Amino acid sequence: MGRDGQFDDAFRDQLEQLFRWRRDVRRFKSDPVDPALLRHLLELADLAPSVGLSQPWRFVEVEDEAARKSILASFERCNARALEGYDGDDRALYARLKLEGLRDAPVQFAVFSDEETVKGRGVGRQTMPETLRYSVVAAVYTFWLAARAAGLGVGWVSILEPKELCTALSTPDAWTLVAYLCVGYPVEEHLDPELERAGWEVRK
């Protein structure tokens, strides 16, 4: 199935279910994730489309406890500032939202765009250099779907200070933070998004 570029109805149905079951996970079990599985998921992420075949994504696994504590502290500062931007019922609801899995996720990746990569030799990004970062987003989503298909959950944390994170990880100046991912086996499975369950927003 699919080896000649053709896919049957059963596969298309499963693919649709994969899209529907991809969730932004915030609650993780402490169970370890097989490093071989992670390597395979990263290999699949490398199949994502990229401008000029530049593959500018750089997945950095964050294992150092000091770095993780620094990133968690950054989230807490940013989240407190974000709370100040809401009033009334929205403020009370925001305060109850769980917006990260930083304390529990056994695997965490910071994902960067290498803005100075020579791979691709500049094709397609002379007039829209931001397509490098768009390419990284495509790799993140590819990783996300592949992880979901393998029974893993992924959560994207964006309530962070990019400069603080780059300092904590000592990344090259040419790397721009695009995503911070928490990865692990989910505590629970839900077809509906958590923000919808919490009453924050509804999907169209």
Image (cartoon, rainbow, N blue to C red):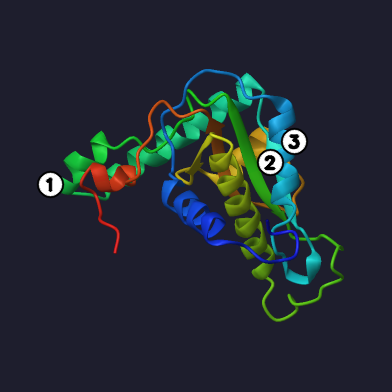
Q: Is residue 149 left or right of residue 21?
A: right
Residue 40 lies, in percent from the top left, at 73, 38
Q: Does 144 appear above or below 114?
A: above
State the mark number for residue 88.
1
Asked if labels 3 and 1 touch by Cβ distance under 8 angstroms, the answer is: no
Which residue sits at x=22%, y=49%? 86
Residue 201 lies, in percent from the top left, at 25, 54
Which residue sits at x=77%, y=46%? 172
Amino acid identity at mark 1? Gly
User: Circle 1 sits in a helix, a strand or a loop, which is it?
Assistant: helix
Asked if labels 2 and 3 touch by Cβ distance under 8 angstroms, the answer is: yes
Q: Quadrant of the N terminus?
A: bottom right
Q: Nearer the viewer, mark 1 or mark 3?
A: 3
User: Circle 3 sits in a helix, a strand or a loop, which is it?
Assistant: helix
Q: Nearer the viewer, residue 199 or 149?
A: 149
Q: Work out how far the residue at label 3 is from the one at label 2, CA to CA, in angstroms.
A: 5 Å
Q: Quadrant of the C terminus?
A: bottom left
**Outermost residue, bottom direction?**
127
Q: Circle 3 is placed at which residue position?
A: 39
Q: Circle 2 is placed at which residue position?
A: 41
Q: Work out how far the residue at label 1 is from the one at label 2, CA to CA, in angstroms.
A: 43 Å
**Outermost residue, left direction?**
88
